[in-house]
Amino acid sequence: MNSYPDPDEVKADLGDKVVEAFARSVARAADDLVKYRQGMPSFVSQASERGLANWIHDRLWYHLTVLLDDVPGVQLVDEEPTREIYVGIRYRLRAKRHGDDGDISTYLTSGAKDFLFQPPSQPTLAGMEEVRLIVGYIWDKESREMGQAVLSLRDGRNDIVWLIELPDAGTGYGGATVTPVPAAPEPSAPIIDVGQEDAAQETNGEDSP
């Protein structure tokens, strides 16, 4: 029977920079989706579930590459159709959306099966065996909205060992979450003396509107 690392151990091993990058990448991809929906609402409404999922995945992967660039011990491998993140010598991750129940969808290719099942535990390699994780977000199928960033460990496609929400780090643009500030009151419009304006127009040879 396999033994698994607990979430706190995994987060500590991954490190704050990596965990924050995961959460922030999801927030940025969600922000991209809002802009896409505002700018091209018909494109989003007409997109298939798979088409929209692929669009979001590309945005999420892009932000991961930006935020994880130059983080020590992190390697990103992009060999389409497989994209993976390696953290240290122990953690191997893929990015996927999760349903409300934590389930994921994927084609069960031999490579997918290999990734989704954890390798058998070996006492002699305790603490060194590869751990396969999925980072992503909760997907609301009804509203077609991205939810909280999550990290899950499973042993089989939908045999979830644990699933945790990652702290909401905001988009990170400008280094912090931007809170809208109420607009300052506009100055009062000037009061124009109509009689003076008419006189000025007559002097300048202008017609009244």
Image (cartoon, rainbow, N blue to C red):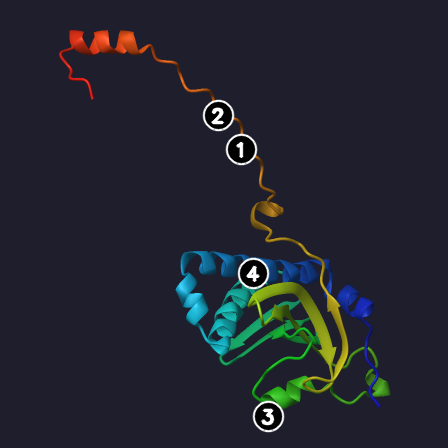
| Camera sees residue 90 | no
**Front: mark 4 or 2:** 2
* Residue 84 horizontal/vertical position (percent): 59, 75
**Front: mark 3 or 1:** 1
| Amino acid carrying mark 2 in the image | Glu
Placement of 77 over or under 191, stated as above or below: below
Q: CA distance from mark 4 to mark 2?
A: 33 Å
Residue underneath mark 4: 30
Residue visible at 56% across and 74% down?
Answer: 77
Whether label 2 touches label 3, CB < 8 Å: no
Residue visible at 45% across and 67% down?
Answer: 44
* Residue 123 horizontal/vertical position (percent): 86, 86
Placement of 39 over or under 119, stated as above or below: above
| Amino acid carrying mark 1 in the image | Ala
Most distant residue in the right direction: 123
Residue underneath mark 3: 110
**Front: mark 4 or 1:** 1
Q: Is residue 62 left or right of residue 72?
A: left
Q: Earlier in the sequence, mark 4 or mark 1?
A: 4
**Front: mark 4 or 3:** 4
Whether label 2 touches label 1, CB < 8 Å: yes
- In front of the other: 195 or 8: 195
Q: Is residue 204 left or right of residue 41?
A: left
Residue underneath mark 2: 186
Q: CA distance from mark 2 to mark 3?
A: 64 Å
Q: Earlier in the sequence, mark 4 or mark 3?
A: 4
| Camera sees residue 20 | yes
| Amino acid carrying mark 3 in the image | Ser
Residue underneath mark 1: 183
Query: Callout 1: few (<14), some (14-19), or many (20+) C-alpha neighbours within 10 Å?
Result: few
